């Protein structure tokens, strides 16, 4: 599909989705949200895609909401505002619950909704010069739709500080609080992203999807008999499945499994 606000590329099993509004620092508006939703969904359904990278053209990853979009929203009815906001909430969920691993390649500012995109991804790799900010309270708003993902990524205590203070923080701080998993010099950012992708591509595609679901389902659950039975049933199903059988066989036979990029 052709997009007006995105560039998409598929190479060696990796779908790279570039936000391409560099003149406004890839600010979110209704069209970008709709096109991101379509592209993320399509990548998740494409059997040739093994992982998804979200990135931004120009000097920023994503600087938050587009000012013209915000002006339009100010004139919406309450019902229109809720419907408009729900589209961003649905995009974040599409990223977080995509069956394929999602990786944010972050450079420059990732503010407000842009920071939400980062935290909705499974993995975030940031350039040293990347900056982050949850700006909403400074303009009398709240970080509502992004809050579940931000809190999950940095923890409630750090979220309390940055939600309430709206301070700008750097990549080193984002790494310290666990919001990004890797940081790199600007000229090494793509190499760091590619190294992470290399690790992901060695895993079984079904195993990755099931592991993402496992993480969601286990988070916050009490460790009890029901959980023990649930996890036992999941590993039994994985062992009996085609991918599990192939993986075990390849290990015993000292060869690469069929899904390995070099097999």
Image (spheres, rainbow, N blue to C red):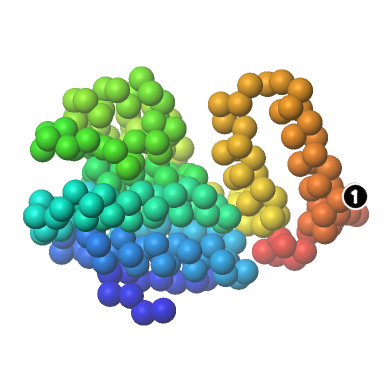
Q: Which x, y percent locates residue 25?
A: 19, 57
Is the N terminus in the top left, top right, bottom left or bottom right quadrant? Answer: bottom left
Mark 1 Cα within 10 Å, few/some/many (few <14, many 20+)?
Answer: few
Where does residue 71 sit, x and y in percent of width and height?
A: 9, 55
> Closest to the observer: 185 or 152?
152
Residue lying at 48% horizontally and 64% vertically, measured from the top left: 41
45 versus 155 height, above or below: below
Q: Position of residue 7 (x, y in %)?
A: 35, 71
Is 248 situated left or right of 6 in this image?
A: right
Q: What residue did someone put label 1 on? A: 252
Q: Is residue 234 visible?
A: yes
Furthest residue in direction bottom, as rendered: 2
Dividing the image into 4 quarters, which one contains the C terminus? bottom right
The number of numbered discs placed on residues in the rendered structure image is 1
Q: Is residue 254 left or right of residue 61?
A: right
**Residue beneath the point at 26% across and 55% down:** 84
The spot of residue 193 in percent (x, y) is 47, 52
Residue occupying the point 28% across, 54% down = 83
The secondary element bearing badge 1 is classed as: helix
Residue at figure coordinates x 28%, y 64% from the top left: 32
The image quarter containing residue 9 is bottom left
Where is 246 relative to 155, above or below? below
Task: Note whether residue 185 is visible.
Answer: no
Task: Give left or right: position of 222 versus 82.
Answer: right
101 w.r.t. 159: above or below: below
| 134 relative position to 46: left or right | left
Most foreground residue, 180 or 37: 37
């Amino acid at each position: 599909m052709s997009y007006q606000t995105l560039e998409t590329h598929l190479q060696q099993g990796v779908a790279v989705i570039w936000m391409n509004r560099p003149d406004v620092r890839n600010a979110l508006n209704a069209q970008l949200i709709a096109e991101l939703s379509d592209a993320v969904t399509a990548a998740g359904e494409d059997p040739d895609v093994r992982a998804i990278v979200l990135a931004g053209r120009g000097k920023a990853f994503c600087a938050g909401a587009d000012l013209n979009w915000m002006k339009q929203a100010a004139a919406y009815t309450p019902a229109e505002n809720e419907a408009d906001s729900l589209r961003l909430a649905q995009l974040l969920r599409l990223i977080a619950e995509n069956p394929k691993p999602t990786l944010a390649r972050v450079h420059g500012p990732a503010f407000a909704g842009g920071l939400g995109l980062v935290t909705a991804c499974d993995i975030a790799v940031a350039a040293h010069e990347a900056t982050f900010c949850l700006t909403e309270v400074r303009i009398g708003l709240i970080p509502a739709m992004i809050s579940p993902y931000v809190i999950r990524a940095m923890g409630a205590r750090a979220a309390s500080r940055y939600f309430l203070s709206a301070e700008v923080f750097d990549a080193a701080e984002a790494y310290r609080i666990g919001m990004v998993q890797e940081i790199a010099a600007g000229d090494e950012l793509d190499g760091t992203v590619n190294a992470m992708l290399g690790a992901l591509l060695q895993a079984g595609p079904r195993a990755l999807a099931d592991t993402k679901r496992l993480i969601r389902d286990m988070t916050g659950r009490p460790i009890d008999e029901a959980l023990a039975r649930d996890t036992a049933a999941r590993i039994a199903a994985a062992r009996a499945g085609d991918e599990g059988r192939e993986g075990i066989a390849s290990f015993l036979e000292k060869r690469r499994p069929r899904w390995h990029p070099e097999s």
